[in-house]
Image (tube, rainbow, N blue to C red):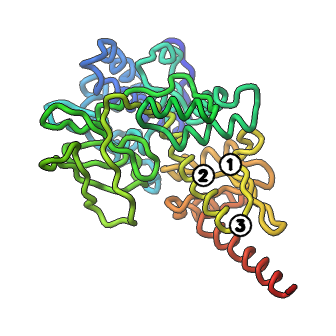
Amino acid sequence: MSGLVAPPSDDMSERRRRAVTAMLRAAYAWSARQARPEAMREVARMTGFVMEAHGPGSGPVTPLALVDALRRPLGELPILGSTDSSDDGLRDAVLLEPDGVGGDRLSAPALDLLCEHVVPLDAEADGQGWLPSWTRMTADRIRARAFAAMAGPKDQRLYETSRKFLIEHPAGRLQELQIGVSETGARMMPGGYRPIPESSLYRTRDDGAWWWPCPDCRWPMAVTRDQVQCRYRPHSTVFRAAERRGAKSPELTRVDEGPAVKTPVALSAVGSGCVGQGVWRFIVVPGASELRIAAQLERLGADVEMWPELDAYDLHVTIGGTEFRLDVKEYRSPHRLITDLRARPPRAQVAVLLPRTHGHQAEAVATALPRIEVLTEQRLLRKVRRIKKTIEERKDGDR
């Protein structure tokens, strides 16, 4: 294990995080082993990291034992068995699931939850482009690389235009995306748009390949046999896909009972593309909430500046002489959110804003970090509505 980036530590939380990272990388490598001859070597290397995190005589000690552990809840590992049960499902997460054809594929928690726990383990991984960024880089590093590419020569307008275009167009027909980039002047991050992942494709009887954008984030939803759902669980709409006689493309039927959404239309995988999974998970997913919240505030009469000072924070809101400086935090794991806020607290006068899907985390964050102001989306909107009402009452009184 040469070229360590995150050296072994006696701190239990860091050892757990290293174990989770190694398990995630091993799971991805195992799922890609048919196409990547080097994948088995990665599984073997990650076995070493899991052994190191556990210590002598504990945990999987061979690559096949590690793969077997990837098919069971992480809480069965000694190092994770005592993880705080409030950590939003970490112990219950299973990394590999049957793919329906006798093999294994990554489960939804790999992208939905565990990627928030990633730490860089070794320098060698950076030279292996086949390993996705979200298996080997922290969320901050993925964002920093993308934002540096979008900002150009520290141009706020260009940065805002590029980031907004990326969030609003994480996938689509490549020709249309190229036209959009040209018309807006947006800058794209290295790597740009890539083919739609195989796990997001619905194969029809005539061997056609189709995909559907998530109603919330617009990235390709995962397809499991005939079930179609976004990998990010807070985007919880569930559909069932089917071929209809006489229809040119497969169609979706809503099967859950959540809030009303517009049913996506199937798009051909031919000529389509999407941003990489790391960019989607750490930029597009929270960005969709940021743009949605900004639009709600503007409808209430507030002025909203997005990502001021090249992302010093996320939203600068002004209404009736009142200002809000907000840093939107959308973590699936409240434990990781608290840990990261403790290590990097918001700037002075900047409040943490939790989107509507994460408002339940507010009490835990405020209790753990009493010096940080924490707002939920619902509470923020109530504040702005009260200010708007006061403004309107003053106007009526002046008439």
Residue 27 drawn above or below residue 265: above
Q: Which residue is mark 1?
A: 314
The three-letter amino acid code for the residue at tag 2 is Glu
Instruction: Give the mark nearest the N terminus, 2 or 3.
Output: 2
For the residue labelled by badge 2, is the local secondary structure a helix, a strand or a loop?
helix
Can residue 56 be seen here? The reply is no
Q: Amino acid at mark 3?
A: Gly
Q: Which label number is shown at residue 342? A: none
Look at label 1 and name its amino acid. Asp
In the picture, measured across the screen, residue 303 lies left or right of residue 399, that is left
79 w.r.t. 131: above or below: below
Q: Secondary structure at mark 3?
A: loop
- Callout 1 touching callout 2 (CB < 8 Å): yes
Mark 2 is surrounded, within 10 Å at the Cα level, by few (under 14), some (14 to 19) or many (20 or more) other residues, namely many
Q: CA distance from mark 1 to mark 2?
A: 7 Å
Q: In the displayed structure, does residue 357 sit left or right of residue 205?
A: right
In screen coordinates, is 342 left or right of 11? right
Residue at horizontal 38 percent and vertical 31 percent from the top: 272
Cα separation, mark 3 vs mark 1, equals 18 Å
| Residue identified by numbered label 2 | 290
Quadrant location, the C terminus? bottom right
The residue under the point 22% across, 45% down is 250
Q: Residues within 10 Å of mark 3 (few under 14, many from 20)?
A: some
Q: Give the CA distance from mark 2 to mark 3.
A: 17 Å
| Residue 84: % across, % down | 46, 52
Place of residue 339 in the rendered image (x, y in percent of width and height, measured from the top left): 60, 46
Q: Residue at x 68, y 48 (%)?
A: 314
Q: Secondary structure at mark 1?
A: loop
Label of residue 301 in the image: 3
